[in-house]
Amino acid sequence: MHIRVFESEQEAAAACAARIAEAVTAHPSLVLGLPTGRTPLNVYRELVALQARRRLDWSMARTFNLEEWVGLSPEEGGSFHAYMERHLFRHVNLSKERIHFLDGAAPDLAQECERYEAELMAEGGLGLVLVGVGADGHLAFNAPSDSLRARCHRAKLSRGAREANAMFFGDDASRVPLEVLTLGMGALIQSRRAMLLAFGAQKAEAVKALVEGPLTPSCPASFLQLHRDVEVWLDVPAASALAGRVQ
């Protein structure tokens, strides 16, 4: 586990975006796992800026997003598909057939999860996954629990998770969907490379648990200790609870 600490979130995001750009350039057919929410926004902004400055070629890459709201179609403004269009996809030369997304409005959600899992496995799994960690240690929408699910599944959101995503629904948590479709822990742990983002003092205890704590489903992120190649990208406040394991 390689831990990288920066003076600010912006510095961390710029360095992380540069690393992703290097990976896409070195491996043009890279299969990327991409998150949504507030945490990766600056990374996407930096990738768009890099694209404008030196024209990265995304034409052979494939993307699989980690989650989608249940009940929202891709065209709806609050969907994670619409989020990705706004913040990354429309700014790079990814073809639509190479962008993979869960359909939260599918008539059979269990079948939709099976379809998505099969599509990802057909591509050989994730070559690089970018993921944020929640203050409670969740990854994607794999929340703390007595047990974790390996495969893509339907998950109910806690009140805290809905409040954390209210910013995408006019700051009204009551408008946030009650459920989400999410990749499971298996796809994240089996990715060939993982890059985890955590910014702000509110993430410090989750970062400590994922780096130093025991493997436990009460902190899903702790299972990244089993990963073959993981980088943890932090600002100083997020790293504040660590006991000297920083680079």
Image (cartoon, rainbow, N blue to C red):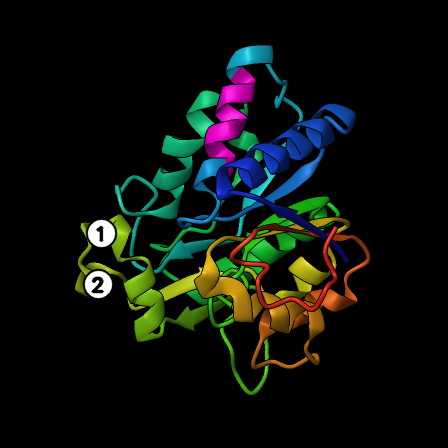
The quarter holding residue 179 reads: bottom left
Per the image, the residue denoted by label 1 is: 169
Q: Are marks 2 and 1 in contact (CB under 8 Å)?
A: yes
Location of the N terminus (image quadrant):
bottom right
Q: Residue at x 28, y 62 (%)?
A: 177
Query: Callout 2: helix, strand or loop?
Result: helix
* Disc 1: CA contacts within 10 A as few (<14), some (14-19) or many (>=20): some
Query: Callout 1: helix, strand or loop?
Result: helix
Please name whichever residue, 208 or 226, is drawn nearer the observer in this view of the structure. 208
Per the image, the residue denoted by label 2 is: 173
Q: Residue at x 70, y 65 (%)?
A: 224
- x and y percentages locating residue 168 in the rendered image: 27, 49
Determine if the magenta segment contains residue 30: no
The number of numbered discs placed on residues in the rendered structure image is 2
Range of residues picked out in magenta: 43-51
Amino acid bearing label 1: Phe
Q: Is residue 65 above or below residue 113?
A: above
Please name whichever residue, 16 or 243, is drawn nearer the observer in this view of the structure. 243
Please name whichever residue, 20 or 178, is drawn nearer the observer in this view of the structure. 20
> Is residue 192 left or right of 174 when viewed as pictured?
right
